[in-house]
Every structure is written in structure tokens, then in C-alpha cells.
């Protein structure tokens, strides 16, 4: 679905020492192939396993799959790249902690998603990442951020003291991640998910109202608004805008806040329906609502049904046989006019290319929306070309509007300069690369 690169082979190390040996061996040759690391390689919609450049050997880290340590009391787990979100979520089942899971397959990597700066149902995944174990381009092994040491691990402090290199290793061409410390969220005692519908004529007003509730602390986790195309793409029901909103806390706080939201919704006159998960559980064929409800509670076990509905295949067969799927992932201000403007841009993409992408608002906080724009199409060359034309046009139109992406697919890394505000800051990062990786051994061209 993306430009296929020359990949010379795949290496599958089983230990951290093997990773270090491989990196050292590649660093010895000046013009040899370079290394692109993957965790589980399920970066669907963004290029899956495709590197950003030709001439690469893929370093597949799925075989490093230990949960090295887990502290329910402390709220952290030390995991390797092959640990999937389903496995960690199952380990936490019945405990007072949960994982901030994503809507992708349960068989995706906890770390792979976090180092690519994915988004979970509770918050951005980078907020879960407090420590990283990294093999540097010369084979040296370092641990950045916070790591539990001995019997008294103390309180989590991702920044440590002084300059913190933690962020240098997400969306990074500076090292290969062999383990990470991931935060585990306190499991709420109670939860209610509200599903609110509204017509497209009320989009800006409804978004402003939802923003107000978010800013006033009524909403737990990432509030979602699906447009009708997006609802259908993921296997949901309905032909209007659909909001999923989670309220969690103690039994009494959830009951009280849910009632407040029902009253606010009623008073606003904006919503066509307000359904509570405890009184109106989603219909058995509403795959989105059924999955999302569990996802807010840290349980990705219903994601495979949603994945099958989106791309028509199980996780293991998505890349070989699944339907076409592309993502464009901009951040936009959480305001009614901004969300309405984004919809106008997508309508323009439709008018110009014949493809109407779906979009889902993921409200990360009261000011920022991760707008997940998805292109779903039949897996033929003709449709893929058409979808990529629409994707390119979306990049153009959103860039002009100042709505920049926070993640890039494997075909669009050359856009880095265009989306970076300060050339001097870009030059600084390139200087770091030159110093740490003069032979450009790691992830050539990726976010570079
Ligand atoms: C229907 C559907 C729903 C989705 N929902 C979501 C969602 O809710 N949230 C979301 O964020 N995404 C979502 N995705 C996109 C994607 O599937 C996930 O982001 C997925 O977690 C990425 O694949 P992965 O975990 O296997 O990571 P990988 O593909 O292994 O890694 C992603 C990238 O990170 C880098 N990387 C990975 N591991 C390492 C390492 N050890 N060292 C150095 N660099 C590394 C590489 O550049 C790699 O290409 C969805 C996709 C689909 C089709």
C-alpha cells in the first residue's frame, strides 16, 4: 500500500546482546545496508513494516518479549518490544492497575506504539513511557529516564535530574529500543460510557460544548467523535456524528457526573440522543461501541472484531491480504470552528479526488485534538493510487491550514522540514545524529 523499499533481509535477535552485536557489525561497514528496527511491525495505515529509505535490513524485535518486571503497587512495568498490549492487559486483569490501550489490534506492541508516539484511549502513549533501554549506533547500551533499582525503586520521575534524553528516542533515528518502563494507570472503581449523536449542521456548536465539558473536568480519558464515514469504516452504526465519552471514578462520582452530563446535553439542545452504557448497552453488531467501552477500561480483547471490520483480516494477514487503509494524523485545536474547518478540507479532498476520508476527533486535552483521518479502499492498484492521491492532497491542504501531523507514514518523511518551525532546531537534531551515528546506521530517513 506504500512505496515498497529495497529491504535486503530480516534479522530476528532473541537477546539484547545479540542486538548490540548486530548494530556493531553494521556500524563497521561504511556503505553497507542500514538497520530499521520494528517491534511487532503492525504500523498499519502508516507504512506497516516499510522503511523510509531503500537499502535496509529490518531488525525485528518481536522475539524480545519478556515482561521483565511488573509492580502493581508502584504502577509500572518493564517490558521488551515483543510484549503486546493484549498480553500486558491480561496480566493486569483483576488488579488495581490497567494499561492505556489503543484501538489497534491486541497483538500490537506496547513499546512499538509508544516509541512512534501513538494514542491510547486514556491519553497519548508517550505519557506512559517513563524509561527506555536503548542500543546506541556504536552498540553501547544506555538506560534513560526512570528505572526501578533494587528494593526501594522510589517514585517515578521520567525527567530525572538535568537534561533528559528520553524524548530523543521516540520517533527517532538515534537508537534501537530494547526495553522500556511503562506506567500502569490506577484502575477506576466504576465507569460509564455515554454515546451522544448529533447532526452535521450542529458540528461546531456540539464540539464547543464537548470541549466545555472536557475543560471543566467532566470527561475521563480521550473523548471521541466519529464522523459518519469513520463510524462505518470501523464497523459502527448510524449516519450522524457520534460521540463516545467516558466517565470514570468511584460509583458515586460516576453516577453524579453522568447525571450532570445528561442534564448539560439536554439543556444544550444539540444532541439527538444520549445513551448510557449501563442502561443501553451497545447492539451486538455495533463493533465500535462494544470495543471502545472495553478499551476505556484497559481491555483490548474486542479490538480484533473492529480490525476485521476495518481491514477485513486478522492481524497476521492484514499486510498480505487486508483491505487498503491509510492514515493522516494531524493535531488541531479543540474548537468547534477548527473541527468544522477540518471537515471542509476533507470535503474538498472528496470533491477533488473522489475519495471521502473518514475522521475521528480524539480529544487529548481541552486544547488539542488528534484528528485521525482514515482512507479505506479496496485492495487494487487503481484504488491504492487514487487513495494516495487523496492522502497527498490532504497533506497539502492541512499544511496550508496550519494543521500539522504528529506522526508520518513511510512515504512522507521528506515533509519533516516543512512541518518543523525552526531550521536551527532541525540543524541541532541533525548535529546530534552526525555525532552519535556518523555512518547513519540506524533508521535512515525516518523522521529525519
Ligand atoms: C483499525 C486500526 C486502528 C488503529 N488504532 C490505533 C490507535 O488507537 N492508536 C494508535 O496509536 N495507532 C492505531 N493504529 C495504528 C497502528 O496499528 C498502531 O499504532 C500500532 O501499535 C503500531 O504497530 P506496532 O505496535 O506493531 O509498532 P511497530 O510497527 O513495531 O513500530 C512502529 C514504528 O516505531 C519504530 N520502532 C518500533 N519499535 C522500535 C524499537 N524497538 N526501536 C526503535 N524504533 C522502533 C519503528 O520506526 C516502527 O516503524 C490503528 C490501525 C488500524 C488499522
Image: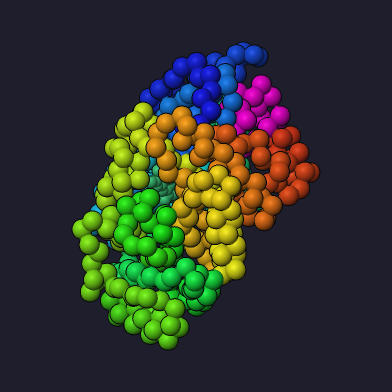
Q: 2 left or right of 266?
A: right
Magenta stretch prevailing secondary structure: loop
Locate residue 410, reporting x and y percent.
55, 34
| Viewer-closest of 407 and 167 | 407
* Residue 150 shows up from this direction: no
Q: Is residue 146 above or below residue 265?
A: above
Q: Is residue 350 above or below residue 325?
A: below
Q: Is residue 5 above or below residue 41?
A: above
- Identify the residue shown where x is 57% and y is 34%: 411
| Viewer-closest of 345 and 301 | 345
* Residue 116 shows up from this direction: yes
Residue placed furthest toward the right? 424
Q: Is residue 158 above or below residue 170?
A: below
Locate residue 194, reporting x and y percent.
34, 71
- In the rendered view of the protein, which quadrant contains the C terminus? top right
Taking the magenta stretch, the answer to whether it contains residue 246 is no
Q: 401 left or right of 69?
A: right
Taking the magenta stretch, the answer to whether it contains residue 440 is yes
- Identify the residue shown where x is 42% and y is 54%: 230
Locate residue 265, reporting x and y percent.
41, 80
Specify start and end residues of the magenta stretch as a single range: 433-448
- Identify the residue shown where x is 40% and y is 26%: 15
The quarter of the image that holds ligand 1 is top left
- Identify the residue shown where x is 40% and y is 22%: 12
Amino acid at each position: 500500500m506504500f512505496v515498497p523499499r529495497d529491504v535486503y533481509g530480516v534479522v530476528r535477535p532473541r537477546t539484547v546482546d545479540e542486538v548490540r552485536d548486530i548494530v556493531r557489525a553494521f556500524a563497521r561497514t561504511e556503505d553497507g545496508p542500514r538497520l530499521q528496527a520494528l517491534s511487532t511491525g503492525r504500523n498499519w495505515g502508516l507504512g506497516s513494516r516499510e522503511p523510509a529509505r531503500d537499502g535496509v535490513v529490518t531488525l525485528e524485535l518481536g522475539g524480545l518479549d519478556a515482561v521483565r518486571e511488573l509492580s502493581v503497587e508502584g504502577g509500572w512495568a518493564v517490558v521488551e518490544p515483543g510484549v503486546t498490549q493484549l498480553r500486558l492487559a491480561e496480566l493486569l486483569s483483576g488488579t488495581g492497575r490497567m494499561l492505556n490501550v489503543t484501538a489497534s489490534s491486541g497483538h500490537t506492541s506496547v513499546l512499538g506504539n509508544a516509541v512512534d508516539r501513538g494514542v491510547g484511549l486514556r491519553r497519548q502513549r508517550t505519557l506512559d513511557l517513563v524509561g527506555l533501554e536503548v542500543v546506541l549506533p556504536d552498540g553501547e547500551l544506555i538506560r534513560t529516564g526512570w528505572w526501578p533499582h533494587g528494593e526501594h525503586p522510589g517514585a517515578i520521575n521520567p525527567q530525572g535530574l538535568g537534561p533528559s534524553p528520553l524524548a530523543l528516542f521516540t520517533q527517532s533515528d538515534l537508537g534501537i529500543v530494547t526495553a522500556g518502563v511503562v506506567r500502569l494507570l490506577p484502575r477506576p472503581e466504576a465507569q460509564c460510557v455515554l454515546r451522544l449523536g448529533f447532526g452535521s449542521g450542529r458540528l461546531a456548536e456540539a464540539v464547543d460544548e464537548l470541549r466545555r465539558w472536557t475543560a471543566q473536568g467532566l470527561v475521563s480519558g480521550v473523548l471521541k467523535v466519529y464522523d459518519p464515514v469513520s463510524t462505518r469504516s470501523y464497523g459502527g452504526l448510524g449516519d450522524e456524528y457520534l460521540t463516545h465519552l467516558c466517565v470514570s471514578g468511584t460509583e458515586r462520582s460516576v453516577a453524579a457526573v453522568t447525571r450532570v452530563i445528561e442534564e448539560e446535553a439536554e439543556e444544550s439542545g444539540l444532541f439527538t440522543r444520549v445513551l448510557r452504557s449501563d442502561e443501553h448497552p451497545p447492539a451486538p453488531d455495533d463493533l465500535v461501541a462494544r470495543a471502545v467501552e472495553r478499551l476505556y477500561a484497559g481491555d483490548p480483547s474486542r479490538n480484533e472484531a473492529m480490525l476485521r471490520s476495518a481491514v477485513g483480516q486478522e492481524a497476521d494477514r492484514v499486510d498480505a491480504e487486508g483491505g487498503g487503509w491509510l492514515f493522516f494524523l494531524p493535531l488541531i485545536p479543540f474548537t468547534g470552528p477548527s473541527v468544522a474547518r477540518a471537515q471542509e478540507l476533507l470535503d474538498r479532498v472528496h470533491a477533488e479526488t473522489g475519495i471521502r476520508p473518514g475522521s475521528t476527533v480524539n480529544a487529548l486535552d481541552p486544547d488539542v485534538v488528534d484528528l485521525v483521518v482514515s482512507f479505506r479502499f479496496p485492495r487494487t492498484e487503481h484504488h491504492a493510487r487514487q487513495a494516495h492521491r487523496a492522502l497527498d492532497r490532504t497533506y497539502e491542504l492541512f499544511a496550508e491550514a496550519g494543521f500539522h501531523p504528529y506522526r508520518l507514514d513511510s512515504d512522507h518523511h521528506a515533509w519533516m522540514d516543512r512541518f518543523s518551525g525552526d531550521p536551527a532546531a532541525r540543524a541541532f537534531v541533525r548535529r546530534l545524529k552526525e555525532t552519535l551515528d556518523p555512518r547513519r546506521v540506524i533508521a535512515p530517513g525516518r523522521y529525519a
